[in-house]
Image (cartoon, helix red, strand yellow):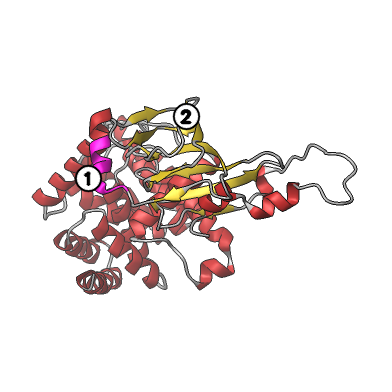
Amino acid sequence: MKTALCMALSGAATAAVAQSPTATTVAPIVEVRSASSQPVATGSAETFTGSVSISSPFQALPPGKAGGATVTFAPGARTAWHTHPLGQTLIVTAGLGLVQQQGHPAQVIRPGDVVTIPANVRHWHGAGADSSMTHVAIAEKENGVSVTWEVKVSDQDYQTALDSTGLATQAGERLKAALRSQASSEVLSARQQAIPLIAAFVAISDMPRLNTALNRGLDAGLTVGEAKEILVQLYAYAGFPRSLNAIGELLKVVEARKQRGIQDAPGREPSRAIATGHELVVAGRANQTEISGGPVQGPVFDFVPVINQFLQTHLFGDIFERDNLDWQSRELATVGALAATPGAEAQLRSHMRASLRVGLSASQLRQLAQALADGVGPEAADRAREALTLALAAASKG
């Protein structure tokens, strides 16, 4: 089968067998297949752009011809151009997305919208740039075929669709701001320099030096909310006990500063609600893939798949979806904590590469290593420098 979606729309053979009457069936019965028992497949790179998951495939019992599936698109993901011999119906259940017929303007689709696509009309559909989107896709078969896939939607066509519908504004401004920051700054700000030191002292449970680093970070412009985000994130790298102890230390620091008449900026809450359930998994997987430079896989994750589920939902989902701390700051914290942790060199190398992907420059990461040398110790700095050397060598090879 070319794709999991094609399989679902073309018959979902296993589901059809499960639902078809057999010789021993006395009368038709109503069957309920729970969501937890249904497979979740990944959309093929041949027919989708971006991260797409396909779940709950179904096929009507004869003489019915309709089949389909629930399809979830990560931000920026979309189908290729395609047609359906007998048309298609989409029911949007979550998120914000786009649908476009060839030769017509793109249209925004929202939860509750029903999209009716006529037979043999060339079209595509997918998520917006900033939001995942989920819909139920339903189509009938003609001579056993329900979909014909064509070429992928180009980045230019997708961007044009975003621009014409207004969905590009938020994503475009964010990207432009990130590029401006990357282009104009080869130097870590005082605020940025404070972050890896805070993280390193959390990792080694050095409360006196953490107290000092937190004060310096707040003096340098770190908001209380940003400091909280850093310490919460570090549960994934330093463990819950150290994270909780560090949060307690931050509370002491903030209260002591108030007693001295210092009113630190509280910071802001996330600008959007964090997804839950399957939507959270999709968002977390997309974040993990973007930061890691590709799907995360390997023998460890094959051996214990649930660990990657936790990474995708808790870390890259629940935490990295919170936009009140930017990804560069989150990677500075992660690198600081891992550099201070003996035995975490493999993870440190991975996150040094991730730091480059989110826009930190080699010059800034060298400054990070020097800050660790000056503030934490030579061992942490040496680990950071070695990881950076390897990351730059890997980047030069593409």
Of badges 2 and 1, the one in the foreground is 2
Magenta residues span 153-161
Q: Residues within 10 Å of mark 1 (few under 14, many from 20)?
A: few
Residue that mark 1 sits on: 156
Image check: 259 left or right of 392? Answer: right
110 vs 376, nearest the viewer: 110
Q: Amino acid at mark 2?
A: Thr
Under tag 1, what secondary structure? helix
Question: Taking 63 as reference, is 111 above or below it?
Answer: above
Task: Provide residue 157's location: percent of width, then percent of height.
Answer: 25, 42
Is 158 colored magenta in this rendering? Answer: yes
The quadrant in which residue 69 appears is: top right
- Residue at horizontal 26 percent and vertical 50 percent from the top: 328
Can residue 218 be spotted in the picture?
no
Can residue 80 be spotted in the picture?
yes
Q: Earlier in the sequence, mark 2 or mark 1?
A: 2
Is 51 colored magenta in this rendering? Answer: no
Q: CA distance from mark 2 to mark 1?
A: 25 Å
The quadrant in which residue 35 appears is: top right
The quadrant in which residue 290 appears is: bottom left
Q: Amino acid at mark 1?
A: Gln
Task: Provide residue 4's location: percent of width, then percent of height.
Answer: 53, 54
Residue that mark 2 sits on: 116
